[in-house]
Image (cartoon, rainbow, N blue to C red):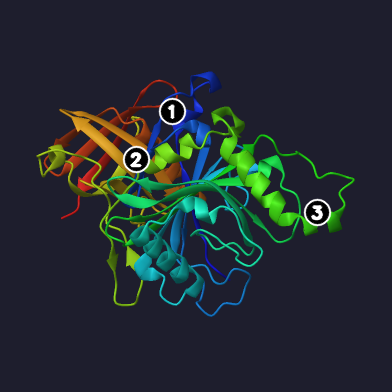
Amino acid sequence: MVKRVIFALVVIALLALPTLAQETENSLLYNGIGFTYSPELGMNVNVMDYPGDPVDMMQPGGPIPPHTVFYFYDDLQNNYGWAVSDAAITVFNVGALSGYEFYEAEVARMRDLLAQRPDLSTFEVNSETDQLYLPFLPVFPAAQAIRARSSYFETQSLSGITYVTMYRQDVSPFLANEFIYTVQALTADGQYYVSAIQRVTVSGFPTEYPTDLDYETFSANYMTYLAESVATINSADASGITPSPDLLTRAMNSLTIGIPTVDSAGGSSVPPTPGVVNTDPTLGGLAGTWNLVSYGAADAPTAAVADIPATLTFSEAGVNGNVGCNGFGGSFAYENNTLTVSSLASTMMACAEPIMQQEFAVTSALQGAQTFAIAGDTLTITYTLEDGTSGVITLTRVA
């Protein structure tokens, strides 16, 4: 069985906001991949690290290589999956694609396209003898039926293309809500391929299949139908495509990725992008790894579960740790003795109840962190408990 490790982004502040107030953009930093995004792209975000299928696996679309993907969704039933989430941003390490021939081919096509810079409009309409398509990952087990509103995409760190598309396994009319807006790009160093896809509805197309469709006549005039569909999409005004493609484009404009490394076994890792910018290498004394001693009420703390490693590490990349079960990480900011921890993401494994209680208490406390103090090798972090009283996390520095 393919092992899938799913991460859930914890955005407590976002969940507390009323819908009409969702106007600010959120920041997300995970494993060196960072970007900002509008809640309109999706009220919730799940992050999945996929370890990769065996390269000889036989399945439609071929085996899927290692990748990290961020799924955006409103409906909790659509919490992950390229086919069902409202939007997704996927990062593939090019060095880890060896043996995944379909994915290697798409990367090669993107490189050629960016090197030659042809007029993208020539890809928008198929002819009877030439089935055209533009680079697209992930590989879908279907045909790229259409391309429209195509253009080149450039930022300081990314080069690629944007377009509206649809994938089909048959010859049939397009429905308004079946379209995909996508940004497909390579990082400036060529080490990462980034795919961003967003489900969009395009006005001018039906919402249901016509009940009186003459399939034989439709099939015979399919090329004309494709050309008319491209024209409809290209002529749609900004309000005719919803949600706005600008939501995804803005997220991609802000995207940054750490410098990649590829190990001797062909695997890949991404050093974190610095989350704290300062000139103090000690990070106010926080830098380093700390063992959990206790947490909870200041006058009656709960001791850490015995004989279970529980640590917290502060570095220029952010804060990360494991207090018994799941690994977690996020960003932090400090000034004098104040401390703010945000955008914590955590693995979602189940463990023994005492450990899960400890994990929930500590991660919740970190998200509500207020001040910190260091005395010798002891670090204390204060926060407020649900009853309004003071809580304290106590840790000791790892030698």
Name which residue lies at 66% across and 34% down: 203
- Amino acid, disc 2: Ser
Name which residue lies at 40% across and 20% down: 388
Q: Quadrant of the N terminus?
A: bottom right
Q: Quadrant of residue 215?
A: bottom right
Which of the two labelled residues, at mark 2 and mark 1, occupies the earlier sequence position? 1
Residue assigned mark 3: 218
Rendered view: 277 above or below 214: above
Residue assigned mark 1: 13
Q: CA distance from mark 3 to mark 1?
A: 51 Å
120 sits left or right of 28 in the view: right
Which labelled disc corresponds to residue 106?
none
Rendering coords of residue 261 (x, y %): 27, 65
Rendered view: 225 above or below 104: above
Q: Nearer the viewer, residue 50 or 203?
A: 203
Which labelled disc corresponds to residue 254?
2
Can residue 349 be seen?
Answer: no
- Amino acid, disc 1: Ala
Marks 1 and 3: in contact by CB < 8 Å?
no
Q: Secondary structure at mark 3?
A: helix
Rendering coords of residue 360 (x, y %): 45, 41
Which of the two labelled residues, at mark 3 and mark 2, occupies the earlier sequence position? 3
